[in-house]
Image (cartoon, rainbow, N blue to C red):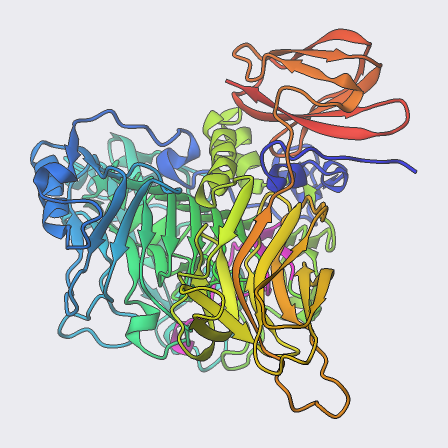
């Protein structure tokens, strides 16, 4: 039997990227047409999504070395449990007065919205203002939003509420000028009747008022629409785009990105110069709200929008990155913005309303997002409200309902390498449908929910019972069986299996620029490192249950001592095992269950005490990923420890404790309760990146500044090198015993993987770090 061992040198996710099925993925035919390898009229043209994100995907978000404005110099005091808003606002004001700067938060917890009734955001209205913490992991910066945001007078509806932090540019606009010639898809200029109105402006807003004559174009030729979609029926499609001016020549205005759709001047497009703040961001912060849940959709504004973290309005080339958001309604949203990046994000705590809301935006990016809330956000990443050319990229939301489009005419957006539970988690008022116009591409989506979906119809005239999308392109849909009504899709390829390239967004950027920007692999590598920092990958853990706020029977979720979510179905008590918080639950109940925990599992223990009916034997079971991994039976009233050793789970795992007690015959009425406290476990040990006992391997230097590594073996082996996206960089490298040079000099810095196979078919994988 062939034996394959994978060494978890950093995180499981890296390894999943390079498993054999991924590497053997077939190259998509629609991709081959895009890059000019084939010319098949039966295959449609892919839109070019590669301009999404900060600096249109070409550059990394900078690490600013601007002047630092420390919030503690303006009155904020960490860890004193009193409001720090005055100090934060003071530091922001000072940075804005200086023309930019870093508003710095040292380690510790800072309090915002300390008293109830506040309805005003902390506003950042200048360019080059970066709110920077000291890390979003354990021991970094926490901004604690103590109370729900109140609605301003006049706000109505559950979705209207200000965020805690609002990045908002002053709305300064030019007079209108008219588009006097068409701008075709793939071109990068407009022709207007008066280009002088753009003097002094870097950005433009293009606007098409509602126009029934434009319906066919943006519905991709579809003419039949549901009568209850009142806006598109009564007044027609409305459109809005933002772009950055490159240069002006006569009455032609050249732009820094190209049009993703055809623009027809006969549809009445007008253009204005548009002011936007630039280069402002929110980074390296753990934003902790206090929504307790459970979330009920559209029940009240407090649950739906009262715990928003950030919003960008009239903003360009701004960002949220390397941050953690706990118990929030939304991570971030956009309004009238361009080239925003929201990347490297952990979302955890209890389920809230939505993930990221990309609305009224052009060429924006939400990616490298891990939704680890207890049951997944109600909506996934949302594209709505005229949004165009934007991308949801490598989102991990295996409990979340799914991707989202809320209507109001989004078009030509991409969901790329997105992991989800259900197929769609859409919303949107009926009058604003369809959910999405033409140009939507779903690329390598993975669905993990257990129920198969058959013949899903994207153009179904029901009332709010499915996502309605005009002619989507679907490539590489895999995971749980999901099939589509072929009359409702423009093109489908490789249903049931991933395709190459794994990420369309990454591949299109590389194709456009001629090389893959270094920031992509660097951001992915950093994201995996952050996952360990967020949940403190240590060798040993203890969960004391002390963070549980439950003093009666209940089914609740809470964040434990090490940052993991725990779901409890029990009674919160104290005094049975010690004086701190404990839980007890009765026979047949799985009373406490963890969220997925990284790092593998080697050993486990928990303190237990039988309650009442002490003549009856109790049985406790440890469940790992739903399977019994060990059990104990005990009789008596003393505190005892249930432990299981040598579990040897190497992948991510879910830990649960079940009271499996069975009453004696005739005693079925007895509850057979057991109290539990102090859950302890140790993770599976991992190898370093420098050595292993496999073939007596020595790998050095690692990291390497030159891309040259030395690999010392005691036996011959064959090697293959992959990049972080799973592509083969070098294959079938024959290695001899002794020192072998491994050379990857002509590649970007970042993380690579070396797969070694010996002569009996054993394979192990090692990480290469190229600085």
Residue nearer the viewer, 392 or 599: 599
- Give the image quarter of residue 753: top right
| Count of numbered circles in the view | 0
Q: Is residue 338 left or right of residue 415?
A: left
Q: Overall secondary structure of the magenta stretch? A: loop
Q: Is residue 225 left or right of residue 169?
A: right
Farthest-out residue, right = 1
The vertical placement of 138 against 435, above or below, is above
Q: Is residue 264 left or right of residue 615?
A: left
- The residue shown at (56%, 39%) is 539
The vertical placement of 425 against 686, above or below, is below
Does residue 76 show up magenta in the picture? no
- The residue shown at (64%, 45%) is 600
Residue nearer the viewer, 153 or 668: 668
Residue 253 % position (x, y): 28, 36
Residue nearer the viewer, 351 or 628: 628
Residue 22 % position (x, y): 72, 40
- Give the image quarter of residue 245: top left
Does residue 424 show up magenta in the picture? yes
Which stretch appears magenta?
Answer: 419-448
The vertical placement of 520 against 743, above or below, is below
Residue nearer the viewer, 70 or 23: 70
Residue 318 % position (x, y): 30, 41
User: Would residue 174 be seen by someone viewing this image from the given angle?
Assistant: no
Image quarter in which the N terminus is found = top right
- The residue shown at (57%, 65%) is 639
Residue 479 % position (x, y): 70, 56
User: Would residue 734 be seen by someone viewing this image from the given angle?
Assistant: yes
């Amino acid at each position: 039997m062939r034996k394959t061992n994978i060494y978890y040198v950093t995180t499981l996710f890296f390894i999943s990227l390079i498993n054999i099925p991924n590497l053997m993925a077939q190259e998509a035919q629609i991709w081959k047409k895009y890059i000019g390898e084939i010319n098949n009229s039966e295959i449609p043209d892919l839109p070019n999504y590669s301009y999404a994100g900060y600096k249109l995907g070409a550059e990394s978000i900078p690490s600013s070395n601007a002047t630092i404005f420390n919030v503690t110099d303006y009155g904020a005091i960490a860890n004193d449990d009193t409001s720090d808003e005055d100090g934060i606002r003071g530091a922001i004001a000072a940075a804005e007065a200086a023309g930019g700067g870093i508003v710095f938060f040292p380690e510790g917890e800072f309090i915002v919205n300390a008293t109830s009734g506040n309805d005003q955001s902390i506003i950042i209205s200048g360019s080059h203002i970066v709110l920077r913490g000291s890390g979003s992991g354990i021991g970094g910066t926490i901004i604690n939003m103590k109370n729900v945001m109140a609605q301003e007078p006049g706000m109505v509806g559950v979705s209207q509420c200000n965020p805690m932090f609002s990045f908002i540019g002053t709305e300064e606009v030019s007079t209108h000028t008219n588009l006097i010639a068409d701008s075709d898809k793939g071109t990068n200029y407009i022709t207007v009747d008066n280009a002088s109105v753009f003097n002094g402006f870097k950005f433009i807003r293009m606007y098409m008022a509602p126009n029934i004559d434009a319906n066919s174009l943006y519905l991709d030729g579809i003419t039949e629409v549901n009568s209850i979609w009142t806006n598109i029926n009564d007044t027609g499609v409305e459109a809005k785009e933002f772009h950055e001016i490159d240069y002006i020549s006569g009455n032609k205005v050249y732009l820094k990105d190209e049009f993703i759709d055809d623009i027809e001047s006969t549809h009445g497009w007008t253009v204005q110069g548009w002011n936007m703040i630039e280069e402002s961001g929110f980074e390296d912060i753990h934003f902790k709200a206090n929504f307790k849940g459970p979330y009920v959709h559209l029940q009240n504004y407090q649950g739906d929008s009262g715990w928003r973290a950030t919003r960008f309005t009239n903003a360009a080339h701004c960002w949220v990155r390397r941050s953690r958001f706990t118990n929030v309604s939304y991570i971030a949203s956009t309004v009238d913005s361009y080239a925003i990046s929201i990347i490297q994000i952990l979302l955890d705590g209890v389920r809230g309303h939505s993930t990221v809301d990309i609305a009224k935006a052009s060429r924006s990016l939400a990616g490298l997002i891990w939704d680890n809330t207890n049951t997944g956000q109600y909506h996934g990443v949302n594209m709505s409200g005229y949004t165009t050319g934007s991308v949801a990229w490598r989102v991990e939301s295996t409990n979340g309902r799914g991707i989202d489009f809320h209507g109001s005419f989004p078009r030509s957006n991409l969901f790329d390498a997105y992991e989800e539970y259900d197929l769609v988690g859409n919303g949107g008022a009926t009058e604003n449908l369809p959910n999405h116009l033409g140009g939507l591409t779903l690329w390598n989506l993975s669905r993990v929910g257990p129920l198969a979906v058959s013949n899903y119809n994207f153009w179904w005239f029901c009332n709010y019972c499915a996502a309605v999308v005009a002619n989507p392109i679907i490539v590489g849909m895999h995971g749980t069986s999901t099939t589509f009504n072929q009359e409702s899709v423009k093109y489908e390829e490789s249903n049931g299996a991933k395709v190459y390239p794994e990420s369309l967004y990454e591949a299109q950027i590389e194709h456009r620029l001629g090389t893959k920007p270094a920031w992509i692999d660097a951001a992915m590598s950093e994201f995996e490192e952050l996952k360990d920092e967020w949940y403190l990958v240590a060798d040993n853990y203890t969960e004391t249950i002390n963070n549980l706020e439950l003093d009666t029977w209940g089914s609740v979720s809470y964040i434990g001592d090490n940052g993991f979510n725990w779901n409890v179905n029990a009674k919160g008590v104290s005094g049975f095992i010690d004086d701190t918080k404990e839980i007890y639950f009765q026979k047949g109940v799985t009373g406490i269950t963890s969220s997925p925990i990284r790092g593998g599992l080697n050993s486990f223990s928990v303190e237990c005490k039988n309650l009442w009916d002490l003549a009856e034997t109790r049985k406790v079971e440890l469940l790992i990923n739903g399977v019994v991994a060990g059990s104990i039976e005990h009789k008596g009233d003393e505190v005892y420890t249930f432990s299981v050793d040598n579990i040897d789970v190497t992948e991510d795992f879910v830990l649960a404790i079940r009271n499996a007690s069975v009453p004696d015959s005739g005693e079925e009425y007895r509850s057979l309760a057991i109290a539990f406290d102090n859950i302890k476990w140790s993770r599976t040990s991992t190898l370093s990146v420098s050595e292993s006992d496999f073939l007596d391997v020595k790998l050095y230097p690692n990291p390497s500044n030159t891309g040259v590594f030395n690999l010392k073996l005691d036996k011959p082996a064959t090697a293959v090198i992959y990049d972080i996206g799973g592509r083969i960089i070098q294959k079938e490298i024959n290695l001899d015993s002794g020192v072998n040079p491994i050379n990857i000099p002509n590649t970007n810095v970042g993380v690579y993987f070396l797969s070694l196979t010996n002569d009996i078919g054993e394979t192990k994988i090692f990480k290469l770090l190229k600085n």
